[in-house]
Image (spheres, grey):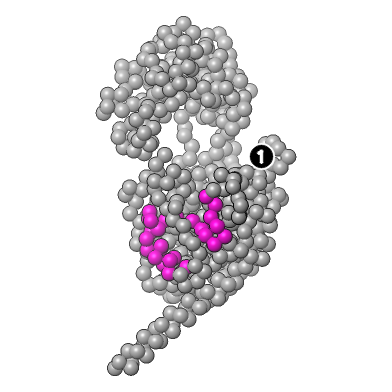
Amino acid sequence: MKRFLSLSLSLLLLWAWADRALWMSRAETITPTDLRAHLEFIASDELEGRDTPSRGLDLAGMYIVSHLQRWGVKPAGENGTYYQSLNYRVDTINTGETRIQIGGRSFEYGVGFVARPVALNANAPMVYVGYGWSNPQKGVDPYAGRDVRGAILIVQAGYPKEVIELGFDAAGQAGWLSPEQNAEQKGALAILRIDPTDMGRIDRIARTWSQRRGVEGLQTMNNLPVIVASRPLLEAIFAGEQASAAELIQRAESGEPAPSFALNPEKRIAVTLSVQTQKEVAHSVIGVIEGSDPTLKSEYVSLGAHLDHVGVSRSGEDRIFNGADDNGSGCVALMEIAEAFATGPRPKRSILLLWYAGEEKGLLGSRLFVERPTVPLQNIIVNINMDMVGRSKQPGDTNPRNRDLSGPNAVYVIGPNVASPDIGKILNAVNDQYLRMELNPMYDSLQHPEQLFFRSDHYSFVSKGIPGIFFFSGLHADYHQVSDSVEKIDFEKMTRVARTVFGLAWELADTAERPARVNLQGLQRRR
């Protein structure tokens, strides 16, 4: 009997070793040469920074799809394709037809004011409400006794001290309401801000403010007009009032308490915000590699990386934001992982591959996917995210902006301490058996000031209760700069990260147990 048990244990250990040897041999097919070849295209000038939406982003998606087809990866997007569409509504200010009139004077867009592009045509009274924040529970209510329905709210830019100290999420739980929330609840038409920071550069921010994009199916657009006034416009508004424009601007600059007074109820302001709307489309890329187990193949280990970057600068000799690290590195690492899975033996569960559009615009691609999933969301057992996995701190680098770059054999891992200890245990076992990278947990905290747990696409899945983990090599001086280029990538390190992620994904896809679902209680961003 003892001999039989010993033999059974030996066979079990041999099977486990053979299984590990299998995925390790597949991981070795991920190479620096292949990573470089993919990245030199994805981060090339010809793709013009892969903005969302843009021709360059479309070309990057087509490049990935051509390889998925060659490797035999099945389409898992919409309507039998590899794509999921982000249908954009683009609202743009018609500057020639947009104006504000008061006291016999007319103010032009981009000179006298800027505004969020929300259509409005109104001749309305104005109500001054100080900073505009309220908390009736604490007796703070600048709207008390004032009828703001159908009015333009005049609001000082800034926040009550308690809101700043608590952070916005906690302040909301403590009963604080923002000016925008109050305006919408009380029926105001718009907010006009006294904002010294912006009023001095209205001509420079006019282009940024004149357009906004929203994605159908996502709450991405605020439909309340917000206006920032120039000093001359404020002087016209407060002419003959109890407080002058100069006094209110000075209070806003110094953070002093806002005065309490009522504007002349007979004074009115005419606001015409003319808006033109058009449609644009961007695409995420989605593929699936079917698992080997007849039952478990209906479940998915999802791996993702955002495909987009920030496009082209309006000025400068080098204008293209190539985004080699952010996030060309994650994209091509995912391509190599996809090839390793698709061209060899399969684990039991299916592998879902996601290259998201719109991360730089607010995690739009991943948010849209979890709201409109192309596979059953409850069948996704985990999300593994790679965002900026290509850089290493070089010896002798004293640039303070590179202080937190990880070393050549190190990577930051974000998720296990916050939302997914089960994944962390499997990752540690994979790492101990294979490449023994330094897995740095520094950012794996809700209290870390960079708040990276909330800032990449895994969080869209975590918000739906799906465990998530995020691999990241660190912030650096080239982050969101035109200098984020291919020659600064450490391809040997990228290879180690991609091989480690492949091993983690294999083990998660092949194990009998699913990681525990995420308990979202307390997972709130601290600002």
Q: Say whether residue 429 is magenta.
A: yes
Is residue 512 shown left or right of residue 225?
A: left
Residue that protrudes farthest toward the front in the picture: 396
Q: Residue at x 59, y 68 (%)?
A: 30
**Residue 329 against residue 425 in the figure, above or below:** above
Q: Which residue is drawn at 43% across and 69% down?
A: 429
Q: Mark 1 points at which residue?
A: 313
Tell me residue 199's x, y (percent).
55, 22
Is residue 194 shown left or right of residue 10?
A: right
| Quadrant in which the C terminus appears | top left
Of residue 61 and residue 376, the one placed in the foreground of this image is 61
- What's drawn in magenta, residue-wise? 404-431
Tell me residue 446's x, y (percent).
39, 48
| Quadrant in which the N terminus appears | bottom left
Of residue 463 and residue 74, the one placed in the foreground of this image is 463
The amino acid type, in three-letter code, at marker 1 is Ser
Of residue 402 and residue 205, the one placed in the foreground of this image is 402
**Residue 268 against residue 391 in the figure, above or below:** above
Is residue 148 shown left or right of residue 229?
A: left
Tell me residue 524's x, y (percent).
37, 45
